[in-house]
Image (tube, coloured by chain):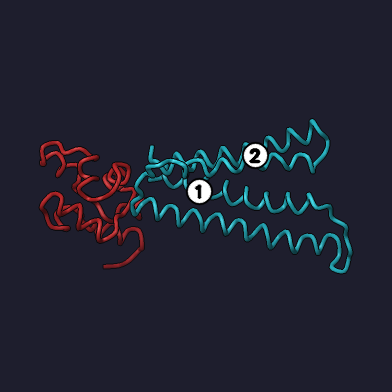
């Protein structure tokens, strides 16, 4: 399930690094998902649900917007939307 | 590899294994009704459920499970409709046919194999894709 041409990007890799090289396994446990799901999200191949996005953000002590970035330009290039 | 991807691979092997053994028995015994015994292999698809500690599933696993089931049932439905219409068109809608009991068995098991194999293949593909 690719993330729609990566319309939603994320900073999970950097935030894990900033959190003392937190492993994907550790983040998965904090967010209540498997390491494979964290891997897929981090690679931009899976868009998490809103609830999971909040859980991941909370695991880092951040807001959702600090972790996930909505790329409107990318969305426009995919949909052909004129802004 | 995710636990549920392993399970999908196992189920695909079981489904394909049943087909291979069915074909092998048919070639060896030359009796189709005897070959239907090969479908007992499909019971192995229940093996992962025998584990005392089941692996936890998360939202991605559940989404892949749901989407792969839709894909499998869509394929199954296409085959059912094509088969039903195809038989009528090929043999004529008023034709009376005698069908041995093993044929029913093969059709039912075959349907289950299609669903199991298609669902497993779709799951594997989705896990690979992300």
State the quadrant of the C terminus of chain A.
bottom left
Q: Mark 2 lies on which chain?
A: B
Q: In this view, does B16 lie to the left or right of A43?
A: right
Instruction: Say which residue appears at 23% left-offset and 58% top-offset.
Output: A70
Counting from the top left corner in percent of width and height, residue A54 is at 20, 58
Instruction: Say which residue appears at 11% left-offset and 54% top-offset.
Output: A62
Q: Nearer the viewer, mark 1 or mark 2?
A: 2
Structural crowding at the residue carrying mark 1, measured as other residues with C-alpha within 10 Å and reported as few (<14), some (14–19) or many (≥20): many
Drawn colour of chain B?
Answer: cyan
Query: Who is closer to the viewer here, A11 or A74?
Result: A11
Q: Mark 2 and mark 1 in contact (Cβ < 8 Å)?
A: no
Picture quadrant of residue B93: bottom right
Instruction: Say which residue appears at 80% left-offset and 64% top-offset.
Output: B88
Q: Is residue B44 left or right of residue B82?
A: left
Work out how far the residue at label 1 is from the one at label 2, CA to CA, in angstroms.
19 Å
Structural crowding at the residue carrying mark 2, measured as other residues with C-alpha within 10 Å and reported as few (<14), some (14–19) or many (≥20): many
Counting from the top left corner in percent of width and height, residue A33 is at 28, 48
Which label number is shown at residue B122?
1
Residue pushed farthest top? Answer: B28
Q: Mark 1 lies on which chain?
A: B
* Residue occupied by mark 2: B18
Drawn colour of chain A?
Answer: red
Counting from the top left corner in percent of width and height, residue B62 is at 39, 54
Q: Helix or strand or loop: what does disc 1 sit on?
A: helix
């Amino acid at each position: 399930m690719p993330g729609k041409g990566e319309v939603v990007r994320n900073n999970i890799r950097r935030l894990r690094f900033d959190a003392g090289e937190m492993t994907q396994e550790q983040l998965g446990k904090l967010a209540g998902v498997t390491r494979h799901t964290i891997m897929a999200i981090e690679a931009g191949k899976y868009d998490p649900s809103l609830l999971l996005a909040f859980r991941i953000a909370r695991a880092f002590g951040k807001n959702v917007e600090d972790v996930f970035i909505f790329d409107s330009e990318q969305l426009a290039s995919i949909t052909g939307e004129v802004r | 590899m995710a636990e549920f991807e392993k399970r999908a691979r196992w189920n695909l092997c079981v489904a394909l294994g049943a087909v291979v053994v069915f074909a092998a028995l048919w070639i060896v015994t030359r009796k189709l009704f005897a070959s239907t015994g090969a479908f007992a292999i499909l019971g192995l698809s229940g093996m992962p459920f025998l584990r005392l500690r089941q692996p936890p599933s998360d939202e991605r696993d559940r989404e892949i499970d749901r989407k792969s089931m839709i894909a499998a049932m869509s394929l199954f439905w296409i085959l059912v409709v094509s088969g039903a219409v195809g038989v009528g068109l090929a043999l004529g809608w008023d034709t009376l046919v005698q069908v041995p009991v093993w044929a029913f068995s093969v059709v039912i098991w075959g349907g289950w194999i299609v669903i199991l194999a298609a669902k497993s293949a779709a799951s594997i593909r989705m896990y690979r894709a992300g």
